[in-house]
Every structure is written in C-alpha cells, then in structure tokens.
Amino acid sequence: MGKISVLPLDSFVVLNKALLNSQDRLTLTVLYQPIIGSIAISLYLTLWSYLDNDISSLNDHYALISSMQMKLEDIIEAREKLEAIGLIKTYLKKDEINNYVYELYNPLSAYEFLNNPILNMALYNNISKKEYKRISKLFSFNKIDLKDYEDITTSFKDLYNFVGSSKIDNTNIKKANHLGLSFEPTINFNELLSLIPEELLNCKSICKQTRELIYQLAFIYNLNNDDMSDIIKNSTEDRKINVNLLKENCRNFYCFENKGKIPRIVFQNQPLSLRQENMQNTKRSKLINQFETTTPYEFLTLKQGGSKPPKNDLQIIEYLMVDQGLNSGVVNVLIDYVLKINNNKLIRPFVEQIASQWKKSNILTVSDALDIAKIEYEKRTIRKTSKKVIEQVPTWFDKNIDDEIMNDEQLKAFENELKGVIR
C-alpha cells in the first residue's frame, strides 16, 4: 500500500481488542521496548489512555501531538513500529478529513515472546548478553524438586455436580487478542516438502505451529527451499521434526556460513513516513519509488543479474543499515552511486567514508540521498580536473530527470526498465 499522509486534523478512535494488566506493562517495557523504542511504547500507552470502555471518543491527531509533545512524523513512525510487531492494527476511511481506527492488541506473554524465533532474536540483537540473561531469569519460574511429594489436589468432579441445563451465549465476552507478525516467506512450503523423502519425514505430522516455526526460521536465517530441506532432513526423529533440533541446526548452519555471526534484524524497506508523498509521472519520482520499495538485498540481487550477492557485499549492507543506521532506500542510492563510479565494485573503505558523511548530514530520504550524491560527485570531479578519468554515473544524474513528464507509452517503457536493474 502506498504512503498515506496523515494530517493533524485527521480524526481517530481507539478500539480495544485487548485485556491489559500490570504484567503486560512489564512485558512491553522489558521485551518490546528494546526492539521498537520508547517512543513506540509511549504511543501505545497513550492510545490505551484514550479508552473509556471498549472504544474511545472521536479525537484528532492534534491531541496526540499535544499529549506526546512530538512531531506528527515521529508519531506515525512509532505507529508503524507498533503495527509491524503486532500491537496495533490500523484502518482508514478516506474523506475530506480522513478517519482512522487504531485497534490495540495484547502483547505476547513472556513465554510466547521468548519462544518466538523472530522476536527473541530481535531482542537478543538489541541488548547485551548480560541483560538478556537477566530478562530471561526475570520471567523464569523458581524450580522445586517435587519427586518426594504426592499430588493431593482436589479435582472439580470431587466437589461439584450439575443439575439441569441451560443454553448460555458467552461468545462476546472480552478476551486477550494477539496479532501475528506479518512477513514475506522466503520459502515455498509445498516445494520444500517435495524435496524431503517420505521415509525421512511424515508430512502429516507437521502441525500448524511447526509450519509457522519453519517459516520464521527461514525468514530469520534467509534460507531457501534447498537449505531448509537439508536442515530438516538432519532434524527428524521417527519421521517427525524435532523442533529444538531444527532451531539448533538452523542457527549452526547460519553461523557456519557467516563466520560465527548471528543474524541481525533491521528495517528492510524504507519507512513509510520517510517516503515521497505524491508519486508523479516523472523519471525521478519513479526512481525514488523503486529505491524506496526495494530492499537492499533485492537491489544487490538485481545488480548481480539475479544471482545471490557475495557475502562481502552483504556484510557491507549490514554495516550500512545496522552500524550506521541508514534507511534502506538511502542504502540503495548509496550502492547504486558507488557501483557506477567504481566499475561495479563495492569498495568498503570508500562506502564507509560516504556513509559516515551521509550519517552526519542526517540523510533520511531517498530524495536527499540523490541530491547529496550529485553534490559529492561534483566536488569529486573538481578535485580530479588534472586527471583525465572517465567514470560512469547513474542515469539519475540527468538534469532533466526532475521535470520530464512521461506520456503513457514512455511511462510503460520506463516501468519495464525498472523491473530489471536501476541504471
């Protein structure tokens, strides 16, 4: 879905789909906050405070701006983080003044969170090992050896009997509601199963939870059908998948392939709040959209003609997004620029130098990245006037790209070009 600009006068109501308690507050603060940040948690609690019963009264976004003392752009980015991690669902009704409905959902329990491969890995990546151990201990039971004890608990049937019957409808009673994490699978499940011999695995033994776990592990470790099928073959016992062994084998496979590193979860696409507001039929606008909606991994794959990018290049991407904190659309522009002027080679020291400069200049959007790349190239050209060096440059250096409006035929041709590699 394209970006929808939220205006201060746009109205909203908060709908309660949760049963929240003090334990949920602890879970939000200790488990969710290290991943999505304090602003997102503050927004969640602020929206919670608007609830009278199950639904709030009508408000406008000025109320949020005043209450949180923050820019609307930061509030929208925080909302997107809550949506991505399964705490909020957003609905929009377009009108002269747009109306939003924000549904609040329960956070997962500590057990569910710490046993979710994606969320657990995200938490581990964002805190120290010492803090992770402290948190795990915080939500752990104190164990007592009961082998010398006898269970003398009274059962329900020992004390109670039913007399008569009545039909009571309790389907509308409040309950805790959770949203699942939404992500694009990296594997085709049916194709995956076709790669595993029946004598090794009984496909009917795979329950919904195990299937979801396989999707999650493939997403975390960026595994394809072939990789995951080999791992599953080594994770079966009595023609069933041992889920603990599966987790361990996935982790070991990734660490072996990546020299002991664990995967790091980062934003894969340009945040919606930092995308262009109105896409036009100009080449620049279309290029910006392509940079914004393509992940750096996908972009590098396109540059490689569809082949998997080299590990060194992927490590550079990780550095740009994790260590430097550049948004993915900005990373794509940087990659395109460096590849063009360096004979299709990502030279790490040069990339780091540019990334550091862009970070200091607070480059957040694709448009800003395009502009600063042109400025830096002009400075680079002036410094090299004494040498006759011919360099390729991206087509977005064309001065006419900003204003050139394309007709339908030109637009179709350019969009077909963008399906390949950004020139």
Image (cartoon, grey):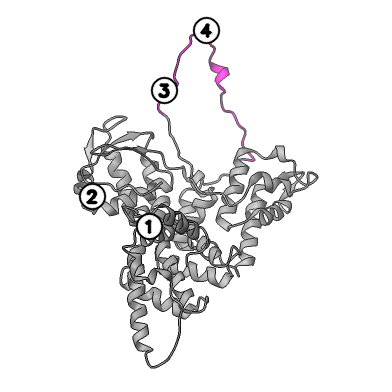
Disc 2, SS: helix
Per the model, the C-alpha gap separating discs 1 and 3 is: 55 Å
Position above or below: 389 against 309? below
Q: Earlier in the sequence, mark 2 or mark 4?
A: 2
Q: Which residue is mark 1?
A: 406
* Span of residues in magenta: 146-174
x and y percent of residue 82 in the render?
A: 38, 47
Identity, as a three-letter code, of the amino acid under mark 4:
Val
Residue nearer the viewer, 54 or 62: 62
Q: Position of residue 352 (x, y in %)?
A: 43, 76
Asked where in the image residue 387 lies, by quadrant, the reply is bottom left
Q: Residue at x 48, y 59 (%)?
A: 418
Q: Secondary structure at mark 4?
A: loop
Which residue is located at x 43 percent, y 51 percent? 31
Residue extending furthest toward the top: 164
Q: Could you say which disc has been placed on residue 172 in the image?
A: 3
Which mark is in front, 1 or 2? Answer: 1
- Assess disc 3: are there few (<14), some (14-19) or many (≥20) residues with their C-alpha within 10 Å of its C-alpha: few
Element at label 1: loop
